Structure formats: structure tokens, C-alpha cells
Image (tube, helix red, strand yellow):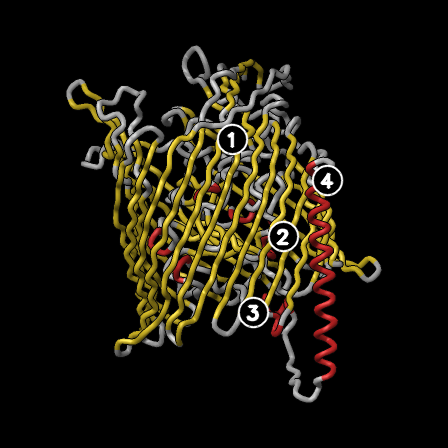
Amino acid sequence: MTKRKLMCAIALATVGSVWMGAASATEKTAEIDSYELAPVTVEGERPAAAAEEEETLPGGFVSSKPSVGLLGSQDVMDAPFTVTAFNQKTMKTFASPSDGVNGVLSLHPSVRVLTSHLYQDIAIRGFRITGHSEYVNGIPGLLGQMNLPHYWVDSVSVISGPNLGVSGTTLSEAVGGTVNYVSKKAERDAVEARLSYLGGHSVEEAVDVSNRFGKDDRYGVRITATNTHGETAIKHEELKRQNIFVNLDQHTEKSRTNLLLGYNHTKHNAGPMRIGFKFGSANVTGLPSAPDLSRSYKPAWSYNEYDNIIAALNHEQKLGAHLTAFLNAGYHHENWYGYVDGSPTVQNDSGDFTISMSNYPLDLTRTYVGVGLRGDFRTGMVRHDYIVGMDQNWMHYYIGNNPAFSWSGTGNIYRDNTWASPEIPHLKPPHSRNTQLTGWHVVDTMKAFDDRLQVTVGIHGHSVKLSPAGKSSTKTDAISPTVAVNYRVAPNVTVYANHTESFGLGSTVSTTSGYANAGEMLDPSKTKQNEIGVKMQTGEFLNTFSYFEIRQANAIDVYEGTQKYRRIDGEQKNKGAEWAFTGTIGKKLELIGGFTYLDVRQSKTARGTNDGKRVDGMPYWTGTLGMVYRPTTDWSLIARMNYVGDSVINGGAIPVPSHTLFDLGATYRTTMGRTPVTLSAMVYNVTGKDYWNPRGDSSSLALGAPRTFTFSANFEI
């Protein structure tokens, strides 16, 4: 039996057993309720749809009470940050086969998608974020860095800007902002099955089972499983992916527990990532026109194959009326054992390129434990909501290049290319390093004047112990504050300001680049943000306007006499303004989107020598707009626009033109017999535009997805 068939069999068997057990439990409960009619009090309950509308902002795309990291859920008008939580409705409407959940995240004006299928990296306010930097149920480091499955995700939130002080300590710094995925939990007894055509020759089967049981529905089980396979809309690109995620939860009057277990297997052939350029008078003198996005520029035999196993545990225990203890723990094993990959480098204006392949496997294990207390007390007229916590991360990291494998070839970006397959090796990566990070948080939110004024003051610190293989350990530490103020000028108008900071693990100076301080451990470089903003709810619209400035200290080369040193002596400044909105026009048209202006400059030193150079791959203007029109209760018409302004690469010498993409689609709710069915169809990149996508602080460019038609049928069994 193949691995794919085995995964499907396991998922279906698990679904069947859980559903049969749920049905049995439901029958028993029904018998007991029928016998004890006298003491039963029957109360009316809003339908799920109505409850969902009550907790969302106008438009229904985002939560009105997003989770703000360690601070917990807050009313969006009270949160002193730019924070957005996209719900399941938005996931179903705007997640795409090429960008996955990034298709949802990019509805936030702070977020821009940087790459395509292979590495689903994003930028928040101009800083790159990978899967390793993102959170699951508030726990860092549980996701892989490549193609991310998302069927198990119920909602995803974005807190813009560096905010380490209100998030769990992470080994992979999230400089531009925090992304947190929340897993699906059992809400009712239900089974859904979905069949999807994803473009090209690619299809996906999915199943979602939800069951609650026990007294007062104390226990819940939610199982999601998917099987994706086939060649995508890009020639030679083939994605095979199997996932199964199980979410278990329980609640009592004094406790809440959630446990997420997940397994993901992916084999990705010829996945597009980036294209580089060799600039020069005898090479590439200007940006070549974008090639056909449906072509492949990698060998069909190049591939990435990996397994990810994750576990996330959250527990809260009420110790008193004003005190709660919490525990968060996570485990992630990423075994990236299959890696034979590389990217083209264009050599001339005719589009000829060279490409080299390497074998570079990786294996890492991350473990996280965080504990703390959350409570409240009063001093006079001021209420204090506080958090005191500490956490620890461990990582064992294995990575290495296989010197026994080397392959190179040539091609052209304007024609189809094929290459004969070499013998593909397998290498167990050598041990690279161990990392241990210990962090602590103290945060106090003070509320006064009927909670119209809220002041948040916090301090975070962590220390890092880095132990490279065969070398002595080094230690670094740093402290960063968080200060935020939020004031409700009127019931529907809030002004806010914040100063937030972040810092990473520190870096080790290269031992192969001729530095006089080779091997030295540099202190963590700090990133600081100042932001002011206003949130206005007018009628059926919420508008958020913000202005921010982020300064990040960078490592640069410094010469002292004839000696070259690597020092933390540079600075990047990201200065910008955002407008985000969500709402409805009439009763049938729902809108979400926004625009961002971002100016990113690089300083040579932080001591005053500022050359004001524009950073490569950073457009000034970006914008997004999503629309859903509902002519009837059964029909929905979907449209989306995404704009990326012009930018530069090669140190500002080569301009990259802007591009605008359009997506169109529709959904229709009907029944087949007694089974409710939702039919969905989408066309992405409707105009079939070929374009270059800037990657941010890089002279290489990514290629987007070609015109792609998708169709799915979701059955509520």
C-alpha cells in the first residue's frame, strides 16, 4: 500500500471511529435527557451564524476580539496595537492553492507575500517572516519554513510591528510582526468532506470531523485530514502532501485545556522560489521582461521532501476570582531529509541562465515550555490586568551540504527546459549546534475612566546559550520594554500609541570571510518601533489609520586600519503609513483591504553617517481589496485586487515595475438529497499577467502564479 493510500485509510478509519463513538454518546445523552424531563430548563440559542456575526466586525471577515499575544483576547477598539484576526469565513473565501493561508494574510496592508509555492515567506512592514517565526495557539517555533498546510487552521491573526514583550519568546525572531495560527476546535457534531481541483492536474481530498461529548459538552475532538497530489498549473511542478491534525479540548468552570497533534508529509518537485541575475555591462544590463509563469525553470527531478510533527498544549487553571495560572508547551520535529534544489541565475539580456543543484538536508527539533500567572487587582480607581511569566526554548539543529553531489546546467527563461536526471544521493546531516533560550515577561495593563484609558507597560528579557558543534558555548542577553497607550475619545473612536522592541539571538561572525574577529558572538541587534494610530467605527465600517517608524540595528563591515571586522554598527529604517478597513455597503456587499506607504532606507552606520539608500525589493506602495457580493442567501460573488508598486534591485540601479492582480470567483449553497453542499469556483490572476515579484532586501526576484482555475465541493454529511 502506498504512503498516500495509507494516510487516507488512517484518516477515514479515525473519522469513522470518532463519529460512531460520538453517535453512541449522543444517543445515550438523548435517552437520559428524555427520562429527566422535569428538571430540564429549555433556553433559546442563537444559530451559529448569528453568534459568529456577533463576534465579528462589520463585513464578517475579522474578529472583534482578537488575541493580543500573552495579553489574551481584547476588544479591537481597546488593543493599543495594529492587530487583525482573520476568521474561518475569510480562510474559506481567500486562501489560495498557490499562496495558501498567505492569500488571507495579505488582506492585511502590513503583509506582503514574498515567494511562491516552495517557501511561503511573507514580509510584515518590510521585514521577512518565515514559518519558523510564526506561532501556533500562541506557541512559537512549531511550523516548518516551507509550504504550509492550512486546512487545520480556524483563524489567523497578525500583530504588526516588533512585539516580543507581548508574545512568547521565540528562537526565530519575528521582527516585523507576529503571526499566530489558531487550530480548529470541536464546536458541534459534524462531518464535512471536500473535493477540490487546484489547477493543472492537481486535486485535493479533505475531511473534517467534529464531535463534543460528556456532561455539558466538556470534551471535544476535531480531526482534519487532507491529501494533495498532482502537477500544478506550473509545468513540472508537482506537490504531494498528506496531513492529519487532531485537536482535543476540555473545559470546566475552573480550567481549559487544548492539545493539538499534527503530522505533515510533503514531497515537492520543481517548486518555484526565486530567479537571480548577474548584472554588468557584459551580462544583464536591465531587467528582462517577466517570462511565462506557467513554465518551470527547474529540473522536474529537483525536489524537497520533508516530514513535520507538532504538538501544542495550552492549559489554564483558575486559582481564584482574580488569578489564573497558565501552561503552554510545544514540540516540533522537522526532518527535511530530501533536498536536491537550486535556483537559476540569468546571465544576459536574452534570458540565458545557469542553474546549480546541491544536496543540503536539515533536521531540527524544537521544544518550548512557558508558565505564568494572569490576574487583576485594583489600586484606587485604577484596575490592573497583569501577566508574569517565563519560558524556555531548546533547539537541536543538524544541517550540512553533501560534497559528493554536484550538478549544474544551462537554460533560458523564455523557453521550455529539460535536463536529464543524475543519480540523486541521500545524506544524513551532521550536527550543527544546540541553542537554549530562557525568557521572562512582566506586563501590566492599567485601566481607568470606565476603561476608556488603558496604559500597558511591560518588560521582557531573555538570555541565549549557543553551543556550536565542536566549539565552546557562548552566551548573550538583552532586555526590551513595551509601552502602549489606548484612549477611547468616543464610543466609536480610539487613538493609540506604542513603543515596542524586539531582539534576536545574536549572530556569529563568519570564519571564512576574512574577518579579524571571526567566530565572535555578536550581541542581539535591537529593533525598535514607534507607532501612533486611530481606529474609527463609522456605520458599518471600521477604519484603522497608523503611522510607524521601525529602526533595526544591522551588522556591517568595519575597517580598523587594514583589519576588517564585523560589527553591529548599521541601521535600517522602515517608515510608513497604513490604512486598513473592513465593512459592508448595504446588506449585500462586504469589503476588506487597505493600503500601505513604506519607505525603507539603509544607513551605513548608526553614528550619523547616513547615505539614505533605498533598500532593494521594497515598493513604496502596496494595496489590497477583497469583496464579497451576496445577491441571494445561496450565492456569493468574490473579487480581489492586489497591487504591488514599483521597486528597485541591484543597489537601486535596476527598476522593477509595479503589478496589479485580479481574482474572481463564486460560491453556491445547495443540497444533494438531504446533504448541504457548497460549490466554489475561483480564477486567480484572471488576466494571466506575467510579472516579477520583489523579495525584499534582495536583488533576486520571485515569480508569481499563472492564471489558475480552481473548483471545490464541500459536503456537510
First-in-chain label (3 vs 4): 4
Q: Are marks 2 and 4 in contact (CB under 8 Å)?
A: no
Q: Is residue 90 left or right of residue 600?
A: right
Where disc 1 sits, the SS reads strand
The dot on residue 378 is: none
Q: Amino acid at mark 3?
A: Glu
Residue with the mark numbered 1: 702
- What residue sits right under mark 4 in the picture? 5
Query: How many residues crowd around disc 4 within 10 Å: few (fewer than 14), some, or many (20 or more)?
Result: few
Residue depicted at 84% across the width and 60% down the height:
673
Q: Quadrant of residue 174?
A: top left
Is tag 1's residue or tag 3's residue first in the polypeptide sequence? Answer: 3
Q: At label 2, which amino acid type do we have?
A: Lys
Whether the residues at callouts 4 and 1 have beta carbons within 8 Å, the answer is: no
Q: Is residue 135 left or right of residue 211?
A: left
Q: Dividing the picture into quarters, in which one does residue 552 lie? A: top left
Task: Give how far apart the Cα atoms at labels 2 and 4 are.
Answer: 26 Å
The residue mark sitting in front, 2 or 4, is 4
**Where 646 falls versus 422 (above or below)?**
below
How much space separates mark 3 and mark 2, taking CA atoms? 19 Å
Asked if 287 appears above or below 171 in the picture, the reply is above
N-terminal label among 1 and 2:
2
On residue 92, which mark appears? 2
What residue type is disc 4 on? Answer: Lys
Quarter of the image containing the C terminus?
bottom right
Q: Position of residue 466 (x, y in %)?
A: 32, 37
* Number of residues whose C-alpha sits closer than 10 Å to that of mark 3, classed few (under 14), some (14–19) or many (20 or more): few
